[in-house]
Amino acid sequence: MGNQVEKLTHLNYKEVPTADPTGMDRDEGPRIGVSYIFSNDDDELEQQQDSVHDLGGENPALQPYDPQLHEVECSVYYRDECIYQKSFSEEDVLPEEGDEGGGGHLSTYTPENLLNRCKPGDLVEFVCQAQYPHWVVYVGDFQVVHLHRLEVVNSFLTDASQGRRGRIANRLYRYKPLSPAVVVRNALEQVGCKDRDLSWRNSECFAAWCRYGKREFKIGGELRIGKQPYRLQIRLGDKRSHTLEFQSLEDLIMEKRRNDQIGRAAVIQELSNFECDSGFLFLFSFG
C-alpha cells in the first residue's frame, strides 16, 4: 500500500474504524476514542472535480453558492471553552478590531476580490457546494501556501482557489494568533514537505497550525487518554443542536469538514435518521 491511504466511505458512525494516533502503524490495534481514516480530503476533492468534467456534468463551483443555505453552523469546545465557532447570527460573533459589522466574516468573495482584502498571515477558506473546504495561508505578493495533494506547495491565490469563492477565515478559531511574520514563516518553511513527512491530514489543520502554532492541529499531536475533551455542537435549528464528543481536535476537524462537504441538508437528514449507539458518546441538547 506504500504511502497510499485507503479511502473509506463514511456510511454511519458505528462502522467507522479506529487507527493509531501517529498515523503510521494503522493495523496494530485501535486507539481510544472516535477516529476517522481518510485520504487527504483535499486530494479527494480534486478527484471529484475531475470526475465531474469527465462525465460532462455541471461543475459545482459554477453553481450559485449561498453559505447560509449550504453550510453547517457549529461550535467547537475544549472542555468548557469555545475554541471555534461558525454562526450566521451576529450576536454570536466576537467583535474584531477594525470590524464594522458582525457576521460579515462568513461572506464569500471571488478570488480576485480576495486579493484586495488579504494581508500576509491571513487564513483563507475556499468553499463550494459538495466539496471539502480548502484552506490556504496568504504569504503576500498574491501567493499562498497550502496542503495540496499530499504536499505543501506555494501557489498563486487565484490558482489555489480553483474557481471557488472564499473568505478570510481568521475569526473562526478563537485561539490567539501568532504574529503575521511568524505565520508566514511557519508556512514557507513547510513548502516541499510531502507524503509521510507531513504532520497534517488536511489543508485546514495545516493552515490553522501555521497561524496558531498549536500541536493539537498535527497528526498525533496530543495524548488520547481518558474522557473525550472536545465537543462538536451542530446547530439543527432554533434552540436545537446535536453534540458529538471526540478524543482529539484532529478527529473533530475531520468530521466537521465531512459535514461541510455533504452540506447542511444532508447533515440534518443524517442526524435525524441516526439511532444512538451505546458504543459512542452522542448527546442531544435542547434549549
Image: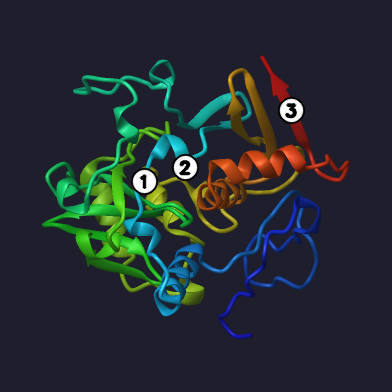
Residue ID for mark 2? 70
Discs 1, 2 touching: Cβ within 8 Å? yes
Q: Amino acid at mark 3?
A: Phe
User: In 3D space, how far apart are the residues under numbered discs 1 and 2 (Cα atoms)?
Assistant: 8 Å
> Is residue 162 visible to us here?
yes
Q: Is residue 266 above or below residue 172?
A: below
Nearest to viewer (mark 3 / mark 1): 1
Q: Which quadrant: the C terminus? A: top right
Q: Amino acid at mark 2?
A: His
Residue for point 47% across, 40% down: 71
| Quarter occupied by residue 22 | bottom right
Residue for point 29% across, 63% down: 162
User: In 3D space, how far apart are the residues under numbered discs 3 and 1 (Cα atoms)?
Assistant: 30 Å
Q: Which quadrant: the N terminus? A: bottom right
**Which of the labelled discs sits on residue 65, or is there none?**
1
Q: Residues within 10 Å of mark 1 (few under 14, many from 20)?
A: some
Q: Is residue 96 left or right of residue 2?
A: left
Discs 3, 1 touching: Cβ within 8 Å? no
| Mark 2 residue element | helix
Picture coordinates of residue 165 (x, y %)? 29, 50
**Which of the labelled discs sits on residue 94, or is there none?**
none
Nearest to viewer (mark 3 / mark 2): 2
Residue lying at the far bottom of the rendered structure: 2
User: In 3D space, how far apart are the residues under numbered discs 3 and 2 (Cα atoms)?
Assistant: 22 Å
Residue ID for mark 3? 284
Q: Amino acid at mark 1?
A: Tyr
Q: Disc 1 or 2, which lies upstream in sequence?
A: 1
| Mark 3 residue element | strand
> Is residue 150 visible to us here?
no
Q: Is residue 100 left or right of residue 4?
A: left
Q: Is residue 116 above or below residue 52?
A: above
